[in-house]
Image (tube, rainbow, N blue to C red):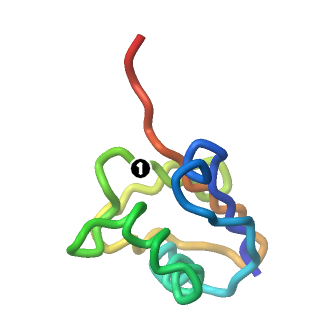
């Protein structure tokens, strides 16, 4: 199962502890995570199910390229990290 974690700055806004879930794509993995946490879904994905512009997801250290369909592959032992993209000085 893939290990999904959310950075601490996201957890300030919505509770989303690390979890292990099955799935072959980022979409499948996140759908399983969000079954139990609809509030986190709304924080990470927009109303169309696309990754929000201020969010970034890494799979095994690589940035997800498909921000719309979230079709990037996830392996059974992958690490999926969801982060908020921050900028400013």
- What is the total number of numbered labels drawn onto the structure image? 1
Q: Nearer the viewer, residue 15 or 85?
A: 15
Q: Nearer the viewer, residue 71 or 51?
A: 51
Q: Which residue is mark 1?
A: 55
Find the residue positioned furthest to the left.
48
Image vertical order of residue 55 relative to residue 30, above or below: above
Q: Pointer 1: residues within 10 angstroms few (<14), some, or many (20+)?
A: some
Q: Nearer the viewer, residue 30 or 13?
A: 13
Q: Position of residue 61 (x, y in %)?
A: 64, 48
Image vertical order of residue 57 relative to residue 86, above or below: below
Helix or strand or loop: what does disc 1 sit on? strand
Image vertical order of residue 83 relative to residue 33, above or below: above
Viewport quadrant of the C terminus? top left
Q: Position of residue 83 (x, y in %)?
A: 54, 48
Question: Is 58 left, or right, of 43 in this rendering?
Answer: right
Q: Residue at x 29, y 48 (%)?
A: 53
Q: Position of residue 43 (x, y in %)?
A: 41, 61
Viewport quadrant of the N terminus? bottom right
Q: Residue at x 66, y 45 (%)?
A: 8
Q: Residue at x 29, y 74 (%)?
A: 49
Q: Residue at x 78, y 72 (%)?
A: 77
Q: Position of residue 59 (x, y in %)?
A: 60, 58
Question: Is 27 left, or right, of 19 in this rendering?
Answer: left
Residue 19: name its quadrant. Answer: bottom right
Question: Is 51 left, or right, of 22 in this rendering?
Answer: left
């Amino acid at each position: 199962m893939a290990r999904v974690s959310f950075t601490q700055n996201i957890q300030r806004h919505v509770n989303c502890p690390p979890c292990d879930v099955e799935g072959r794509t980022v979409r499948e993995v996140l759908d399983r995570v969000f079954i139990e946490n609809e509030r986190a879904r709304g924080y990470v994905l927009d109303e169309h199910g696309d990754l929000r512009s201020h969010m970034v997801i890494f799979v095994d250290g690589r940035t997800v390229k498909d921000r719309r369909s979230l079709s990037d592959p996830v392996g059974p032992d992958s690490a999926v990290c969801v982060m908020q993209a921050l900028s400013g000085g």
